[in-house]
Amino acid sequence: MYFCLEMKQEPHIYQFFAKVSDDTPLGRLFNEVFSALGMPRTISAPDTTTVDGWNNSEKALLFYEMCLIEKYLHSIMDNLVKWKHLTKKYANEFEYSWKFFALANRIDLINEFGGDENDYNEFGSVRTDFSDTELEDYTIVAELADVHTNSIFHSTNPMNCLTSCFMIEHSGANNIIDFFKKTTGKPIKTYRKDDDGELIENDWADEAMLKAHKELIHENIAALLWSVLIFVRALVNYVEKLPKTEDNKGFFVMLPTLIDKIFNLNVPLIELPKIDDVEND
């Protein structure tokens, strides 16, 4: 007797980036980044049919880097939304008082998860006379600086992403058409639509113009990504250095506007380092 088990085909989850579900300029930029890195992501994704799939450490490292940039860009979106939400809560519910915020935060956590013996008074209710030292890890600054976890949002610096920026630039000069030409040894025909919607085959001049245009687009994507990463890192560094047991009202009044600037890509443009400069450091 033979048993035939119908196996459900699961989608291949490794080959493609999970796009950002956000239509702000920042979200669109990150999705452009994922599109530009689509080729290195695809060719480095685990594939059991690849002869050297088990032992190719270079391929494995590239795939891991693609996973890290994906996770990091998503974390930027998530954490900036979280920061803006907490800042509004800090303003509207606690009138920029670090102590009221921290006290309410600690009491909420004790009520939800339970506390230590010294968190309660002799009558069994939660204390409200916590010292500044006891409250400092529950402040708005501690919440934003994420003192309880080592998240990728807080541990990443722009230099960690520099290789990905270089790959974005490189992918503009080496597109999928070039890849297939090198692989097959045959020219690949491409087409464009004219004003009447008719397909017209591109000649070498058209191809050169399209390639130059794509190179410029990818250079701009890489430079803009680099600028965003530097701005975000500077903001994280600033938050982590804020005194926890002070109101820091001036900064928190300004923070939602700074976050909006990032989402709208209204950040100072910083030139991407040259590969030769990085290698000589």
Image (cartoon, rainbow, N blue to C red):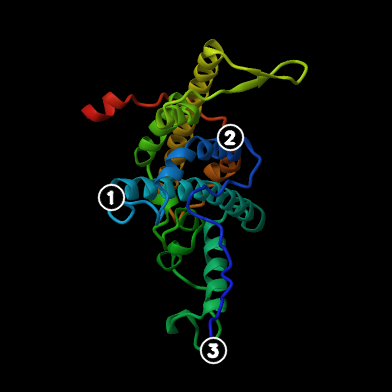
Name the kind of residue labelled 1 in the image.
Ser
The span from disc 3 to disc 2 (Cα, nearest Å) is 50 Å
Q: Return the mark for residue 19.
A: none
- SS at circle 2: helix
In the picture of the structure, the residue carrying the numbered disc 3 is 123
Decide if residue 17 is on the left or right side of residue 281: right
Residue at the left extreme of this rendering = 280
Instruction: Give the residue at x 55% y 51%.
Output: 78
Position of residue 270 measured from the top left corner of the image (x, y, whole percent): 43, 25
Mark nearest the camera among 3 and 1 is 1
Name the kind of residue labelled 2 in the image.
Lys
- SS at circle 3: loop
Towards the viewer: 248 or 30? 30
Name the kind of residue labelled 3 in the image.
Phe
Q: Quadrant of the C terminus?
A: top left
Towards the viewer: 70 or 250? 70
